[in-house]
Amino acid sequence: MIHYIENEYLKIGVKEDGAELTSVISKETGFEFLWQGNPDVWYGQSPVLFPNIGCMLDDKYYLDGKEYSMPKHGLFRKRKAEFVSDSDNKLIFVEKADDATRLIYPFEFEVYVIFELIEKSLKVTHKIINNSDTIMYFSIGGHPGFNCEIGDYLLFEKNETLDTIEIDTECLRTGNTIPFLNNCNKIEITKNVFDNDALIFTDMKSSYITLASDNHNRTVKFDFSDCSYLGIWAKPGAPYVCIEPWWGVNDSHERKADISQKDAIISLESGNTYSCYWCAEFAE
């Protein structure tokens, strides 16, 4: 089932499956900003990544000496979220721990995904509650894909000197970085820019990046100021680009003895709540 909200400027739809954003339409022109999914290219649109980003080494992790299996990008996107409520400008969904999740992730969690329209912007907030009696370890991320064309470009707020974190064919970090931006702010979307998979950045000076084009005036200004890593990805040559705020990072080839030692892992005390957000402003 898809739930909708709208205001004067935008209409958005969110699927119960994965609490996944499925549409962002301009009320003025009818333009669809969000990639509509194509199983021959990439079936996703905007999955929620929890409790891990990307791949774990051998799709496994360890907690208190016990081995668990975990699929790429975690468990959220494969499950139906519970619709909580809506209003004129807000949709709220929640995913809760159950017997199926405990087999691969033995924590008592609630993950709320809140979609809020604020004039021409969409704010997406993730609120994670630890109902376990122990510390809970997790990562969380967004993965929205926006329609674009080859030749469009992304502009950081400020000039950046950034390396991209190299990943291999198993989507694991190699430990190497590759120089990518040298005191500039523009990433052109070419047919080959994602040949080696996602661009992964950290320690950015900018707080937002803007998807733009020389062929029209439409823009998506994406605020990622709250995140620790930023992924940018598409299937090579495809007419979309994913701007991915990550609170965490995919595994390397270094085997960790316990998930508590995972790079960039978030640790949440029993009874506590962790919140993070991303925000996209749509203009024409």
Image (spheres, rainbow, N blue to C red):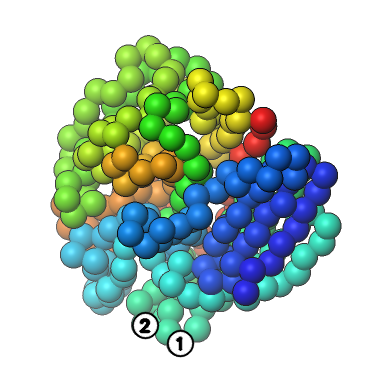
Q: Is residue 46 visible?
A: no
Residue at x 22%, y 50% (from the top left corner): 172
* Residue 120 in sight here: yes
Q: Residue 103's mark? A: 2
Viewer-closest of 230 and 252:
230
| Amino acid at pointer 1 | Asp
Image coords of residue 268 (percent x, y): 50, 60
Position of 177 relative to 276 (above/below): above
Q: Residue 191 carries which label?
A: none
The residue that mark 1 highlights is 99
In the image, 198: left or right of 153?
Answer: left
Could you tell me residue 189's position as x and y percent? 37, 30
| Image quadrant in which the N terminus is located | bottom right
- State whether residue 102 is above or below residue 258: below
- At horizontal 27% and vertical 73% (from top left) the residue drawn is 69
- Determine whether, in the image, residue 198 is placed left or right of residue 282: left
Amino acid type, label 2:
Leu
The answer to whether marks 1 and 2 mark residues whose Cβ atoms lie closer than 8 Å is yes
At a point 50% along the width and 55% down the height, the residue shown is 36
Q: Which of 241 and 271 is in front in this view?
A: 241
How dense is the environment of label 2, judged by Cα within 10 Å: few (below 14), some, or many (20 and up)?
few
Q: Nearer the viewer, residue 151 or 196?
A: 151
Q: In which quarter of the image is residue 238?
A: top left
Horizontal and vertical percent position of residue 88 = 83, 57
